[in-house]
């Protein structure tokens, strides 16, 4: 089973295709070469790669489910 986590893009380096993504207060660098993103977008991340853009509503719903709410 694979698990992908939602996060919010804080900044994007267009040259390297690496973004700083916030996951509930924890920030990590993520490869965004598979999706077109900009600061403020929500993405779902698996194994260090952003694999899909999400709406803010979908990101919140997934986060709530993962938090057991």
Image (spheres, grey):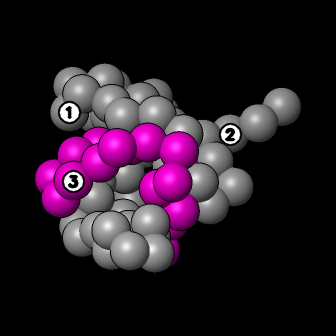
Q: Is residue 42 visible?
A: yes
In percent of width and height, residue 61 lies at 33, 26
Which residue is at a point 53% across and 62% down the rendered structure image? 31
Contact check, label 1 and label 2, Cβ < 8 Å: no
User: Which residue was labeled with disc 2?
Assistant: 3
Q: Is residue 67 visible?
A: no
Mark 3 falls on what kind of element? loop
Between the C-alphas of marks 3 and 1, the distance is 14 Å
Q: Which mark is residue 56?
A: 1
Residue furthest to the right in view is 1
Mark 2 falls on what kind of element? loop
Q: Which mark is residue 28?
A: none
User: Which residue was labeled with disc 3?
Assistant: 38
Which residue is at a point 28% across and 58% down the rendered structure image? 9
Around disc 3, counting alpha carbons within 10 Å, would you say few (fewer than 14), some (14 to 19), or many (20 or more)?
A: some
Between the C-alphas of marks 2 and 3, the distance is 23 Å
């Amino acid at each position: 089973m694979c698990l992908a986590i939602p996060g919010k893009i804080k900044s994007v380096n267009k040259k390297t295709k690496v973004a700083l993504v916030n996951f509930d207060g924890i920030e990590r660098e993520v490869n965004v070469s598979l999706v077109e993103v900009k600061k403020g977008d929500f993405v779902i991340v698996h194994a260090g790669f952003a694999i899909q853009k999400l709406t803010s509503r979908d990101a919140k719903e997934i986060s709530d489910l993962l938090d057991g709410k």
